[in-house]
Image (cartoon, rainbow, N blue to C red):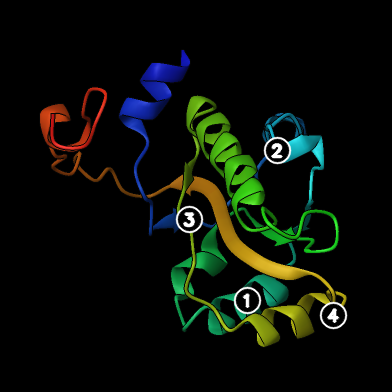
Amino acid sequence: MDVFEAIRTRRSIRKFRPKPIPDEKLEIIREAGRLAPSAGNRQPWRFVVVKDPERKKNLAKAADNQMFIANAGVIIVALGDPEASPRWFKQDPMIAVEHMILAATALGYGSCWIGAFNEEGVKRILKIPEGLAVIALLPIGFSDESPPPRARKPLEEIFFLEEYGH
C-alpha cells in the first residue's frame, strides 16, 4: 500500500480483536516512528510499548475508561522531553505517532490516537520519570470494525493561496 492509500483508508478504530501483533510487524511500526522528522533533529520523544494485558487494562482505565484500548495488540505511549526541545516537545512526538499510524495502516492494522487520559495515572502505571510528558496513547491491533470514511471539508474551504481568504 502506498502512503496516499494509507492516508485515504486510515480510520480511528475503537474495536479490536484481542490478538498480538507479530514482533516483526511491530518493529516496522516502531521504525516508522523513529524515522519521523523533528525540530532541529532533537528527537524529543520516548515511547513505551505495552503488551501486557493487565497493564493495557490499567492504561484503558487511566484513559477515561476507554476500555476498547485494552483489546489492542499493543499500546504505544508517546512521551515528550521538554528538556530536549522546550518549544516542540509536544508536536514532534505527534509527528512520530502519525508515522506509526500510517505504517500500521499500511500493514493492515487499526489504530486510534488517544489524547484523553490522566497523565499522572499513566506515569504511575508505566513508571515514567517526572521530567517527561505523556503526549498520546496509540493502541494498535487487528481491527474488529470497518467504519466508513467521515465527511471532510472541501479543499477550497481550508486552503488559501498567498493570503487567508483567497
Q: Earlier in the sequence, mark 2 or mark 4?
A: 2
Q: Which circle marks residue 130 in the picture?
A: 4
Q: Residue at x 38, y 52 (%)?
A: 13
- To which residue does mark 3 refer? 113
Badge 2 element? loop
Seen as rendered, the residue at the extreme top is 2
Q: Is residue 109 left or right of residue 92?
A: left
**Considering only order in the chain, which callout, 2 or 3, is on the residue closer to the N terminus?**
2
Q: Quadrant of the C terminus?
A: top left
Query: Is the residue marked by circle 3 packed among few (<14), some (14-19), or many (20+) residues within 10 Å?
Result: some
Give the quarter of the image for residue 130: bottom right
Q: State how far apart marks 4 and 3 are (Cα).
A: 23 Å
Q: Residue furthest front?
A: 163
Which residue was labeled with disc 1?
59
> What's the amino acid at mark 3?
Trp
Q: What amino acid does circle 4 point to? A: Glu
Q: Which residue is mark 2?
A: 38
